[in-house]
Amino acid sequence: MTLSTWWLFILMTFVVSATPGPNMLFVMSISARHGIRAAVMAMLGCMTALLAMMSISAAGLGALLQTFPTVFEALRLAGAAYLAYLGVKCWRSPVQDQADDGTRGAPRVAMPAVRSGTIYRQAFLVAASNPKAILFAAAFFPQFINPDLAKLPQFAILLTTFTVIEVAWYFVYALSGKRLSVYLQRATVMRAFNRLTGGVFIGFAALMATAHE
């Protein structure tokens, strides 16, 4: 792999990673609700799933899914179902107003505590819910690998580069979510935010369920 090929990979990955999707939305929403520390756990969950899927793709599962479209369809529909479930759960998420302290204005939100393990698990499932990540890796990565050279070191370089860029964009979305948290102190705004993010997750689920190769 030449230096120019690597820079082309960086450019394309930068654009692909910047595109809003379920992973970015989940990281941003967690940051808005629970802060940057919780968002870091969401990032870890997403990246664990993505790296696992891409490694599996390198091992040949991407070709297997293309050969057996029924398996891919089953995984795709299962992923869409999970995103829809997450969207409904987010939409219906209860918002508890803090007790009235005598101050004027709308009631403020009392955020329930959420375990780090729960956030990590949810993030992992969000990232793993889209089997197209496997096909993406199977189709995208080989374009930048020189078949005349050892493939494993090249794949390691590409995977490391992808991880750095993806995590950088996670932090951009997390910081955006943190800035939103100032406005989410109002119970009415938090309810609207829950329904907006829930609706977007349901929209992603609908797109995944109706998408065709």
Image (cartoon, rainbow, N blue to C red):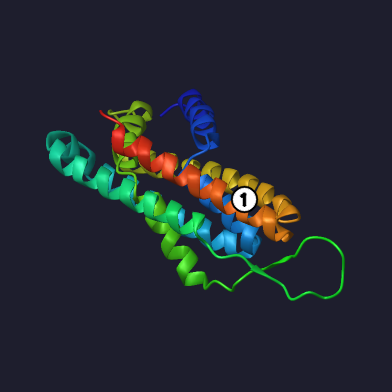
Examine the rendering and report whether any part of residue 51 can be seen: no
* Horizontal and vertical percent position of residue 208: 34, 38
The residue that mark 1 highlights is: 192
Q: Where is residue 68 in the image (x, y as percent from the top left)?
A: 12, 38
Query: Which residue is found at the position 28% from the left and 28% from the top?
Result: 148
Relative height, residue 210 to residue 184 (above, below)? above
Residue at (54, 71) in percent of width and height: 114
Query: In the image shown, does 16 or 121 lie closer to the viewer?
Result: 121
Residue drawn at 62 percent across, 46 percent down: 173
Between 30 and 168, the residue placed more toward the observer is 30
| Neighbour tally class for label 1: few under 14, some 14-19, many 20 plus, Cα within 10 Å | few
The reply to whether residue 61 is in sight is yes
Give the image location of residue 181, x and y in percent.
71, 56
Judged from the image, the secondary structure of the residue bearing numbered disc 1 is: helix
Give the position of the C terminus as an image quadrant.
top left
Q: Which amino acid does label 1 sit on?
A: Ala
Q: Is residue 102 left or right of residue 27?
A: right
In what quadrant of the picture does the N terminus appear?
top left
Residue shown at 34%/35% (left/top)?
A: 136
Side of 73 where 83 appears, left or right: right
**Horizontal and vertical percent for residue 196?**
56, 46
Residue nearest the viewer, comparing 79 with 92:
92
Furthest toward the right, the residue is: 103
Q: Measured along the vertical axis of the image, is residue 7 above or below residue 151?
A: above
- Which quadrant of the structure image shows residue 85? bottom left
